Image (spheres, grey):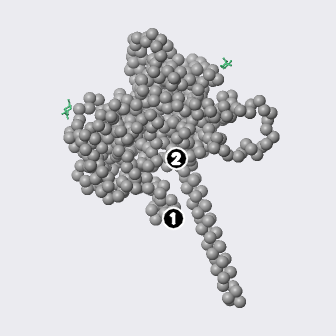
Amino acid sequence: MAERNGPSSIKVGFRKSLFYFFTMASLMFFLSWFFVMQSTYRPNPMEYNLIPNSKHLSTLDDSKYQIRKQNVESSFGNRKLVKDDGGKCHQNDELVVKVYMYDLPPEFHFGLLNWKPGGSSVWPDVRNNIPGYPGGLNLQHSIEFWLTLDILASEFPQAPKARTVIRVQNSSEADIIYVPFFSSLSYNRYSKGKKNEKKNGNKILQEKLVKHLTTQEQWKRSGGKDHLILAHHPNSMLDARMKLWPATFILSDFGRYPPNIANVEKDVIAPYKHLIPSYLNDNSTFDSRPTLLYFQGAIYRKDVWPSCSLIYWLFWPFFVGGLARQELFYLLKNEKDVHFSFGSIQKDGIKKATEGMRASKFCLNIAGDTPSSNRLFDAIASHCVPVIISDAIELPYEDVIDYSEFCIFVRTVDAIKENFLINFIRGISKEEWTRMWNKLKEIEHFFEFHFPSKENDAVQMIWQAVARKVPAIRLKLNQHGRFFRSPPSTDKGLKSIPSPRNFW
Ligand SMILES: *[C@@H]1O[C@H](CO)[C@@H](O)[C@H](O)[C@H]1NC(C)=O
Ligand SMILES: *[C@@H]1O[C@H](CO)[C@@H](O)[C@H](O)[C@H]1NC(C)=O
């Protein structure tokens, strides 16, 4: 009897453990998926050592960071002085995007800047009244503000000649339908919520937006495929994106997005607005920059999983990016000409970082809680050659810019090998560095935001990137409309069969 029982109880035990294993594995899988989709981790607002106090932030360096009415007026007025080029076509004419913009209620856009409509229009008259965007760290995601202003400005005859966007009033004539929701500001302003509030203001606005959009004629016509939605802050639109994903998003990276919701084919990566002022009249040289390698910021991720946890061991490859900072700190902390410092709360964070980056030959960009960060664009503005250690980073307009001409890329697995990084950086010659430094000065204007926009500044580069998506959007729309003459299909099943075409 015992002999007979033996193998079968072993079998049962084996099955049981197999069952446990699968249950655990699926649980882990769902958990990790859940965290990818619902990540509510808030990035450290003190990356540059600023006190995360909205009052402080909004008054910080007002003069430098807020757009002032007078400046806008005078520069806009100057455009009138630009001589007409006699109707000659501008080089970029074929890349002009025709945009239809929804007249959303101000609570979705300039109302978030405390602007109140005067007459019947939901838009400010950008010729003489620009509501200021809050300064400080808010600014790094202010892309929504600049793009919307550029659309509004395109309606006036004195708009910049080299414009890349034109607002049209008939949505049938538009290349793309623009959704003017300042989602990053909504996140920054309202995601904290007040006491006794079930839902925070950011969630409520997103719900309203989804409800509004999905009932619009234009949305129903295309299923949203020709819509353009801003979600530059990695945590903005967390709720709405699951319903609005057929649209093209403007993002800072894909770090928090599953690939079917956002991907490089469908979406547009926009730069952060750098916080460090541009280095004008940079007379520095390889030898006049004493620091070899510079990194300033949060070194320890706040949400690092305890490395002993099972989830960590099962999914360690996903965490390597965040841990690289810590790893690198231990590898580099004893190098004399390397500045690698912890973020501590000081008011002069931006000033210190400005001095630090301008005095450094190379500036490190290590993946943090997201693959991208403002630091890359601060380094470019400081002409400090970026060293990028972020395997999943996506770069703005990389289809037209070769970043390897002015950035050093290092794979994370290599960077955390002993002495690899420091030897690699020390091996870069003065001539090579000077070539990259010169290139940085050539390309920095691609990352500058202006109003009114200037030729090939960040605003126009983003529109051009959008323009390059238009043919693919048209293809999708035309395929979508193939059967419009056919009576409604009786084959219900076919609709749900995924094919490479209707994947997004
Ligand atoms: C919008 O444009 C389409 C196509 O050009 C045209 O058929 C339609 O009449 C226009 N609608 C209005 C209101 O002008
Ligand atoms: C650059 O110019 C500034 C001000 O004109 C001067 O103080 C500085 O020494 C110069 N640096 C170099 C490396 O020439």
Q: Name the residue under label 1.
A: 310
Residue 165 appears at what percent x and percent y?
51, 23
**Displayed quadrant of residue 179:** top right
Q: Report the number of numbered marks.
A: 2
User: Disc 1 on helix, strand or loop?
Assistant: helix
Residue neighbourhood size for the residue with mark 1, other residues' Cα within 10 Å, grouped as few (<14), some (14–19), many (≥20): few
Quarter of the picture containing the N terminus is: bottom right
Residue to which mark 2 is pinned: 256
Residue sitting at x 40%, y 31%: 446
Amino acid found under the numbered disc labelled 1 = Leu
Tell me if residue 421 can be seen: yes
Query: In the rendering, at what x and y percent does residue 372 appear?
Result: 44, 44
Q: Which quadrant is home to the C terminus?
A: top right
Residue 114 horizontal/vertical position (percent) = 50, 28
| Residue displayed at 56% across by 46% down | 259
Q: CB at mark 2 closer than 8 A to ligand 1? A: no
Q: Where is residue 183 in the image (x, y as percent from the top left)?
A: 53, 36
Q: Residue at x 64, y 73 (%)?
A: 16
Q: In which quarter of the image is residue 306?
A: bottom left
218 or 203: nearer the eye? Answer: 218
Q: Residue at x 24, y 42 (%)?
A: 430
Looking at the rendered structure, the kind of residue marked 2 is Arg
What is the distance, in whole Å, between disc 2 and disc 1 at their CAs?
22 Å
Of 381 and 352, which appears nearest the observer?
381
Above-or-below relation of 125 to 318: above
Give the answer, above or below, for where 82 lies relative to 44: above
In the image, 361 versus 78, the foreground residue is 361
From the viewer's perspective, tell me whether residue 24 is left or right of residue 358: right
Is residue 116 at all visible to an observer of this figure? no
